[in-house]
Image (spheres, rainbow, N blue to C red):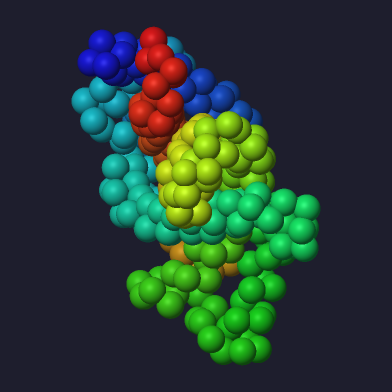
Amino acid sequence: MLAFLLRRLTGAVPVLLGVITITFFLVRLAPGSPFAGERAIPPAILQELEARYKLNGSLWEQYTSYVSDVLHGDLRLSTRYRNRTVNEIIGQTLPVSLTLGGSAFALALGFGIAAGVWAAVRHNRTADRLVQILCLAGISIPSFVLAPLAVLLFSLHWRLLPPGGWGSFRELLLPASCLALPYAAVVARLTRASMLEILPMDYIRTARAKGLPAATILFVHGLKPASLPIVAYAAPLAANLLTGSLVIEEIFGIHGMGSFFVEGVLSRDVFLVAGVTLVYSALLIGFNLLADLTSAWLDKRVQLS
């Protein structure tokens, strides 16, 4: 176990370095300048700006200098949000995205697994078909359609929840639900398919013959081995949700990391884009490692090698 962890953590270093390299060169080689605006900047001021943000010198010198700063924990100043460091921006926006994404992650897994088990138990009945129709609708409707509809119904028509804002549970409920719905539909379909393979097995029939409670058969003997595809899907899902959603954040007026990332791309803020991408990659690697460990715990046949 320890050797596996060390090997995976060691292997993550070149992956993160590759992410930094590709992101840095892609943004720097894109047309335009991070200091371009409606008015032309005098050459002397432009040179001062490039020197301040360490964007002077050759591209290789800029890259090696940036990697050195990152290794020392300095993600540098943002060229879009002047006088603010990327460390500060990520430190302020990441908790917001983590709260929103963590809530959506819990809702997606909770409702998705419950709906999938319910549909599998009632296979080919009305309830099963209803769950499949809802899953298809949840996957098909994009967030930019679902979120305005939810605001129209729950905020403007029924006046149950606020249409935007951040800070209270009522303000969190609507955006987290809109963000979770498509992923809950995917989890429900994965759970249903896995449970349909597990429920006809001999050891499940033996458990029923012994008179074990239906809940024990489903959630202890059935759901545990059926969770392997869900765990594999949950790793990229968690990284995707926890780093923010541009559409949901924009519609509900939430200042999370996703909205800052897109602003950084549009304004060619190389350090903000590279910093957010680095955080996203680190989360993805961490959750994939956690998924491997969870899979080995759920199924002893899975080897950590």
Q: What x and y, as percent, mark residue 287?
A: 40, 33
**Residue located at (40% from left, 71% from top):** 166
**Residue located at (27% from left, 16% from top):** 1
**Is residue 93 at all visible to an observer of this figure?**
no
Side of 44 relative to 177 (left or right) = left
Q: What x and y, as percent, mark residue 214?
A: 50, 54
**Residue located at (53% from left, 45% from top):** 208
Q: Nearer the viewer, residue 221 or 182?
A: 221
**Is residue 126 at all visible to an observer of this figure?**
yes
Q: What x and y, as percent, mark residue 6?
A: 26, 14
Against 223, residue 251 (above or below) is below
Q: What x and y, as percent, mark residue 289?
A: 38, 26
**Residue located at (61% from left, 89% from top):** 158
Q: Nearer the viewer, residue 276 or 98?
A: 98
Q: Quadrant of the C terminus?
A: top left
Against 136, residue 87 (above or below) is above
Q: Nearer the viewer, residue 219 or 186?
A: 219
Q: Nearer the viewer, residue 113 or 70?
A: 113
Side of 197 relative to 111 (left or right) = right
Q: Please, which residue is most extreme toward the bottom here?
A: 158
